[in-house]
Amino acid sequence: MDYFFNQKIAKNMAFLLNTIFLCMHIFFFLFFSYYHVGIMANFNIFSMIFYFCSYAFIKKNMLALYINLMAFEVIIHMIFAVVCVGTGYGFQMCLICIVSIFFYAEYFSLKMNSGKSNVSGSLLSALSFTSYIGLLFGMYGREPLYVINEKVQLFMCAAMSVITFAVLIASLKLMTLFFLKSEARLSKQAEYDALTGLPNRHYIMRHLNRILEKGEADGYWLAMVDIDNFKGINDTYGHNFGDKALKALACILSDEKHDVTVCRWGGEEFLIVGRLIEASRPPFDKIDSIREQVEEYELMYENGEVNKRVPLTITIGAAAYSKETTIEEWVSIADKRLYVGKYNGKNRVVC
């Protein structure tokens, strides 16, 4: 489940929604009581009791039940309100804006119940739509049960319009926020390695292509990094410890003092991209200092009474960009130099 679609957020949103509806019904109660619309004043007493009790539903995570009951309360309330005072007061507009809440509730329910929803946005919206159309035709040519005055009617129509637009604007704003967060999360999943938190191959290839497109590639070097004897580490100490070694290396390589871009290329391989200091050669001393830092790192294996330092070394093949070279060829040159280092004793840098 998404970090922004969870039970706590759903409860907070339901709590806020319930509070807004409760305040609205307190206002409606005072309004109808003042203008002696007895039926609606009494109905709003029931509504206020319902929304007070709804806090218990929300607290107990009975959110689907709350939404379904709330939907019926709103629909029935608006039907009674229109029958009592007519369509000129705009109460029927609430049947439009409430639709967005139904679908948000269904969306949250789907997210929190692995694709199974206890709220049907389509069904509740169909009931709301049917009620809206039924009120428009049903009240056509008929006098309402209560007549107040035109100024009050204009005021209430304006108020209901404000409520309707406010709900729709807030809904669309939330939808935009959720879409942006979803896109950011998916982008991060697509471009970042879950284990180490580093960018992955897709990210670094796009980064290198941007450098090449800007004509700046001749000012960069890249290096392929591989953990020495990583299979032996996994076989001897287990894959969890192997993951620990990968995280440790990722932390060392991504240290800000190195001023390089690092990605996990795949398996136990990492790719480093940095700016050239000299005209055409990767900075051997800088790269070798990274290798030394890894060699000096105390990677500890702890299992019961066993507490020992496990050697961690890397071999690095580095290459500066050559003109008329593709990104793939550039990476391949660094990779070949990496294997030269592997075949010549490991734990070394080949430029």
Image (cartoon, helix red, strand yellow):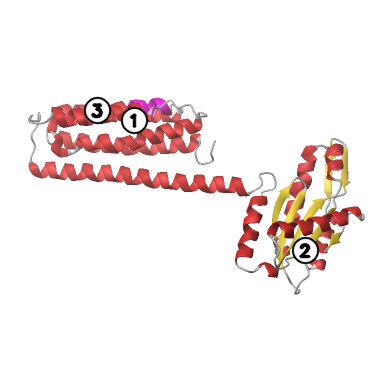
Residue at x 73% of width, y 52% of height = 250
Magenta stretch, residue numbers: 64-69
Q: Quadrant of residue 323?
A: bottom right
- Name the one closer to the observer, 276 or 6: 276
Location of mark 2 (residue): 319
The amino acid pointed to by label 1 is Phe
The amino acid pointed to by label 2 is Ala
**How much space separates mark 1 and mark 3, taking CA atoms?**
28 Å
Q: Which mark is residue 52?
A: 1
Secondary element under disc 3, as helix, strand or loop, is helix
**How much space separates mark 2 and mark 1, taking CA atoms?**
69 Å
Residue at x 65% of width, y 60% of height = 208
Q: Quadrant of residue 222?
A: bottom right
**How much space separates mark 3 and mark 2, taking CA atoms?**
70 Å
In the shown orientation, is residue 64 left or right of residue 114? Answer: left
* First-in-chain label (2 vs 1): 1
Location of mark 3 (residue): 130
